[in-house]
Amino acid sequence: MNPTTKNEEIIMHHEKSHTETPAIACIVPDPLRFSKLEKLRSTQSKVLQFLRLLIKEPKDGHLQQLLHLKRAVDSDVILVRVSQEMEFPEEIKTLRAGNNVYDRKSPLFKCSPFLDESGVMRVKGRINAIEGVELDVKQPIILSRRHRVTYLIADYYHRRFHHLNNEIVVNEMRQRYWIKGLRALVREVAKDCPRCRIRNARPAPPEMGSLP
């Protein structure tokens, strides 16, 4: 061995990209631990009830607005906001800065999104002047197909309408939500449904044996 040769050490390391977790996510149960939307809603209501006992007079007006959500259905506002901030962080940041989404690479470029009073991102519609129509119909809530909360919502609608045709579920969900790839999501939910798999299963009769 040549004494003049220096020992070389190779140090290998890897960099892991960490997605910034929304601040509101700390008061939301992990959706991956729930199989039904009703259970997630119930747990979210209990978390809000505990925070009301713990924080009598919150100084943050935004937190005070969230703690005033009484019904289990109203807690969907928190679940929707967390899913939106995790799936569309750049769009949310742009809208909070008072700007519009002009990035053509964004999946929401053609939706003209905006934030409502509760901080939920919605589609800016053209029928806002119509009367007697709910806000969700005029300005649907934007959701990402990939998030677990969206899957639980689709599963809830699937069971609510008695496992009927997928187009019925798609039509009813479009009355409130804007989801890119909604039909594929509803088909996925129906495929994972045990009741639908049993109903659509075809019998496999055994082959008749040979006669003597």
Image (cartoon, helix red, strand yellow):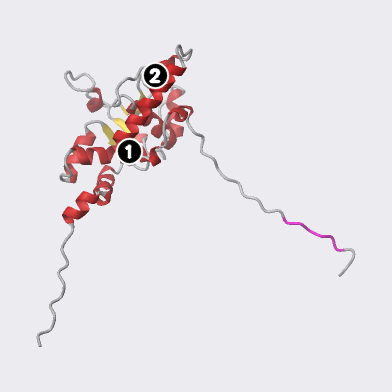
Q: Nearer the viewer, residue 140 or 107?
A: 140
Predominant SS along the magenta part: loop
Residue 123 lies in quadrant: top left
What residue did someone put label 1 on? 150
Residue 186 lies in quadrant: top left
Going by the image, does 196 lie left or right of 18?
A: left
Instruction: Estimate the x, y position of residue 117 in percent, counting from the top left.
Output: 36, 19
Which residues fall within the magenta stretch?
Answer: 5-10
Sequence-earlier tag: 2 or 1: 2
Crowd band around label 1 with a 10 angstrom C-alpha radius: few (<14), some (14–19), many (20+): many
Question: Which residue, as the protein is rendered here, is positioned at the far right?
Answer: 3
For the point 65% across and 50% down, the residue is 13
Going by the image, does 14 lie left or right of 164?
A: right
For the point 29% across and 22% down, the residue is 71
* Disc ID at residue 67: 2
For the point 37% across and 35% down, the residue is 109
Q: Is residue 170 visible?
A: no
Please, what secondary structure does the residue beneath circle 2 have? helix
Which mark lies nearer to you, 2 or 1? 2
Please tell me whether residue 164 is drawn above or below residue 63 in the rendered image.
Answer: below
Residue 93 lies in magenta, yes or no? no
Q: Quadrant location of the C terminus?
A: bottom left
Query: Looking at the picture, which amino acid does disc 1 mark?
Result: Thr
Query: Looking at the picture, which amino acid does disc 2 mark?
Result: Leu
Instruction: Estimate the x, y position of residue 48 in percent, counting from the top left.
Output: 39, 23
Please tell me whether residue 55 is drawn above or below residue 204 in the rendered image.
Answer: above
Please tell me whether residue 122 is drawn above or below residue 30 in the rendered image.
Answer: above
